[in-house]
Amino acid sequence: MNWTRKDLIAIEDLRPEEIVHVLDTALTFEEVGQRDVKKVPALRGKTMVNLFIEPSTRTRTSFELAAHRLSADVVNIMATASSITKGETLKDTALNLQALHADIIVIRHSSAGAAKFLADRLDVSVINAGDGAHEHPTQALLDAFTIRQKKGRIAGLNVTILGDILYSRVARSNIHLLTKLGANVTLAGPSTLVPRVFEQLGCRVCYNVEEAIADADVINLLRIQHERQRQTMFPSIGEYATIFGLTKERFARTKPDALIMHPGPINRGVEIDSDLADCKRSVILQQVSHGLAVRMAVLYLCASVQPVEEAA
Amino acid sequence: MKQTCVMDTVAMDRALTRMAHEIVERSEDLGKIALVGIQGGGVRLAQRLAAKLQEITGKAVPCGMLDITMHRDDLSLRKKPPVARQTNIQFDVTGRHIIFVDDVLYTGRSTRAAMSEITDFGRPARIQLAVLVDRGHRELPIRADYVGKNIPTSKEQKVRVLAEEVIVE
Amino acid sequence: MNNLTIRNGRVIDPANKVDTVRDVYVRDGKIAAEPAPDAIVVDAAGLVVTPGLIDLHVHLREPGRSDKETIETGTRCAAFGGFTSVVCMPNTSPAADNTGTIAFIKQRAEAVGCVNVLPTGAITKNLEGAELAPIGSLKRAGIVAITDDGHCVQSNEIMRRALEYAKMFELPLMDHCQDNNLVSDGVMHEGYWSHLLGLKGWPSIGEEIIVARNIMLAEQVDWHVHCQHLSSAGSVRLVREAKKRGVKIFAEACPHHFTLTDESCKGYDANFKMSPPLREPRDVEAILEGLADGTIEVICSDHAPHCAFEKEVEFDKAPFGILGLETELALSLMALVHKKLLTLPQLVEKFTTGPARLLRLDKGTLSVGADADITVMDPAREWVYDVNQTSSKSRNTPFHGWAMKGKAVTTIVGGRVVWPKK
C-alpha cells in the first residue's frame, strides 16, 4: 500500500485500503505508547501548527501529544489569540503560517470546507481536525480502530449512531468510513436531526431508539450540542433524554456484547445514563487513548509525503 | 536480471547452526541473552536462531521484533512514507545482552536506527549484531559480531533472502 | 450623427411580430422608416438584429461599494453582453430609498454609463421591511419598480400596503422571495448535497411560501407582483397555476438557476453561492419548462459583483451572488435555443417585451420612433468566457473558462455603438 496523500481532509475521499492502512499504521504507534520512552524521531525537525479557529481542548491536546511523540515541534494558535478575530481572512492566516515554514497545519474550524480551503491553497500538509458539520476524519478513524480492536473486524457489524446526525461531523465521517468498510450503519435520533437523505449513502434511518439499538454490535452516541443547533430542532434536553437517551433499561435489551462509544465530551444523563458511561462495555476512554495512536499515524503518513514538483 | 543462488537451504541452516554455537561460545551469561529480529527479514531468522539456541542450551531464549521505520535517517528524503510494521518486545531490555538479528548487513543504517530505538525500551548491558549475509559497502562504523556468509557485491546488485535460500541478482 | 443602417440582418422584433431579413434604419438616435443619407452602414448579413436587450435584475453597487462595481464598469459589462438597458437594484449604500440616491444614480449613469440605467426604489426604508419608503417621491424621481431585493419583506401587512400603494403609482413590485425563518442562516440548497457537505440548508420551501403569499396578495390587491429569480420547481408550479387564474403574477429566472445544480457546491467554491441557491436537477428542469411554456416571462442576470477577497473565504462566510451580464445571453442561447426548448424569437421576448411590459417601458421594440437601442448577435459564434478580460471590477463567476455558443457582436444604445468599443 502506497500512501500518497499529504492532506487528510475527509474520509469520503479515502479508498477502503487507505483507511485500513491508517488503522494498521496506528497499531505500530499504539505499541510506541507502551514503551518507557513514548517517542520516536519520525518527524524530528518538522513543525506542526494547531490552528484552532473553533475551541476544542481534547482534539487539540490529542494532536499536540501525537506530534510531540513523533518529535515534531508544535505551535498552538487559538481563535481568541489569533488574528482571525482581527478580521484577517483564513487565506491570509494560512499563507502566513506557510511563510513561517510550518510543515503540518491541523485545522479545526466552524465552517464546513475550511480544511479543503487550506489544502487547496497550501503546499504544507493539512489535517482536518473538524470542519463545521462536514467531517472529523481522525475521530472516525479512532472509532474504527477501537471497533476493530474490540470486535476484530468492521465488515458485517451493525453500528448504530444515535443523536444529532444533522449537525455532526463525527456522524458524517463515521458514516463514510463504516459504509466503505462494509458495516451496516443505522442512524437514529429525532427526525429533525436525522435526515432521510443519508439513506442514499447506504444507511438505515430509524426514529425508534429501541428498534435502532436492538441488533447493534456498536452504539455510537453523539453529543447533543445546543450551540450548533437552530433552536427549533427538539423541545428540550429533558425530552431528548426521555425519548432518545441511552438508559439502563434500553441498554439491557441490546446484544450482551454491544459496545458503547462516544466521541466526548459526554453529557451525563442526557444522551447516556451516567452509570453506563462508566460500565465495562463502555469504551469511551479507550477511544481517547486510541485517538493518540491514530493521530500519530495520520501525522506520520501525511507529513512524510513530499509535495509533487509541478512541471515547469 | 540474472539470478544466482549463493546459499541454499542446507547451507543456510548450517550457517545458522554455526552462528548459534558462536553465540553460546562467546556468551558470558546465557541467561541474559535476548534476540531481537529487525523487521522485516530479521524476524524469521531471529526465531530460527532462538530455536537453535534452545536446542543447544536447553533453555528458551527471549525473542522479540523491532520495526525501525520511525528511526530511519532517510524519512524526510523519501517521497512516500515507508510502511511501518510491528514491534513486539515482551522482556525488560535493561541489563540484557541484546543480539540484533538481520538478514543482510549493507550500509549499516538499519543497525544504527535499531540501536537508537532499542534504548527507548531500556539500557541494554551489551548489543551485538548477527546477520546472515554481509555484503559490504558500509556507510557507518558498524560491523557484525556473527556472520553467516560474507558475499562481496556491487552496489547495483540485490541480495534477497528467501525462506529457504539466498539469491544475488 | 447617430445615423446607422444595419444591413441584411435577420431582424427579430417580437413586439411587432417581425422575423425577417431586412435593413434597420437609425436616424438621430431613433428607429426610422427610411435610411439617413449620411448613415454609417453596419453589415449584419448572417447575424441577428433584435431590440436592445433589457436586464431586469442587476446590482451596479454604486453608490457605496464602488470597489465591487461602478455604474461605469457595470454598464460596460452590459454592453459586452448585448444589453442596452439594465434595471439596477436598490441595495446600495445608502439604499435607494430616497430621491437623492435615485438622482445620483441617474446623474452618474448619464455621465459615465454606456447603456441605459433604470433604477428601482426600495419598498421599505433602508430595506429593513419595517416602514414604507417614499414610493411616490421615488416614482417622480424616475424609478421603474420597487423592490427590497436581497431582502424580502417579511411582514405580510407591510407587503399588502406597499402593493396597494404602488398600484396607485402604477409601479410594479418585485420581490426576492425568501422566508427568513425557514431560510435562517442557510447557505446552499437544502438537500442531499447540503447534508453531505455539512452546509446549512436554504430550503425550497423558504422561497415557495413567499411566492404563494405574493400570489395571494397580487390577487387580493389586483396588482403586479414580480417574483425575482425563481429557483425551485414548486415556485414555478405556483406561478403557473396562478397565471391560469389571471392573477397579476410575474416571474424571472437567472441562467445559473437553469444551467447549474447544487452539486456544483461540492468543492466549497463560493462562486457557486448565490441566493436563492442552486438547486436540484428537477428544479432546473422545472425552470426550463416554465421558460418554455411562458410561466416565466423574463430572463435576467442578478449580476452581483463581489471582491475576490470577499468571495475567497469559507463557503458559509462568503457573500451571496455572482457576475452575470457577460454570460447570460450565451448561457440562455445554449440552454434554451440550441437545445430547442425555445425558438430564437421566444428567447428574445424574455429579454425585450417581457421586461418592457412589466415595467411599462417603450423599449424592447424596433418600432419606428422608438429609441434606437439595438443588439446585433451571432447565435452560433463560439467563444470562451475569460473572466480575466471582464469589464467588471469583480471576478466572481462560476462560468470562467466555459465554452460558449452565441455572442452579442454589436450593442447600440440610442443609435451609438457602445460595444465593441472603437
Image: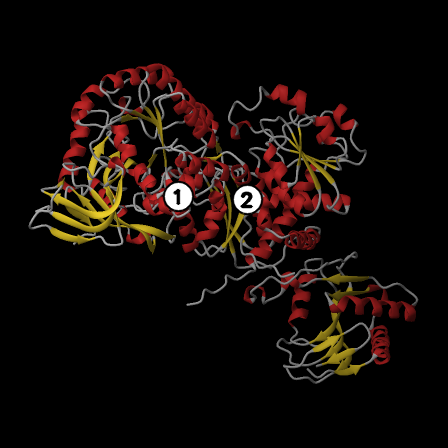
Tell me: A245 left or right of C389.
Answer: right
Question: Residue under circle 2?
Answer: A129
Q: How is the image coloured?
A: secondary structure
| Badge 2 amino acid | Ala
Question: Residue under circle 1?
Answer: C336
Q: Secondary structure at mark 2?
A: strand
Q: Closer to the camera, A187 or A300?
A: A187
| Badge 1 amino acid | Leu
Q: Circle 1: is it few (<14), some (14-19), or many (20+) Cα within 10 Å?
A: many
Location of residue A24 in the rendering, given as x and y in whole percent from the top left corner: 69, 54
Residue A24 visible here: yes
Q: Closer to the camera, B85 or C157?
A: C157
Q: Quadrant of the C terminus of chain C?
A: bottom left
Residue in the image at 65% along x and 63% along y: B69
Q: Quadrant of residue C364?
A: top left
Location of residue C106 in the rendering, given as x and y in whole percent from the top left corner: 16, 33
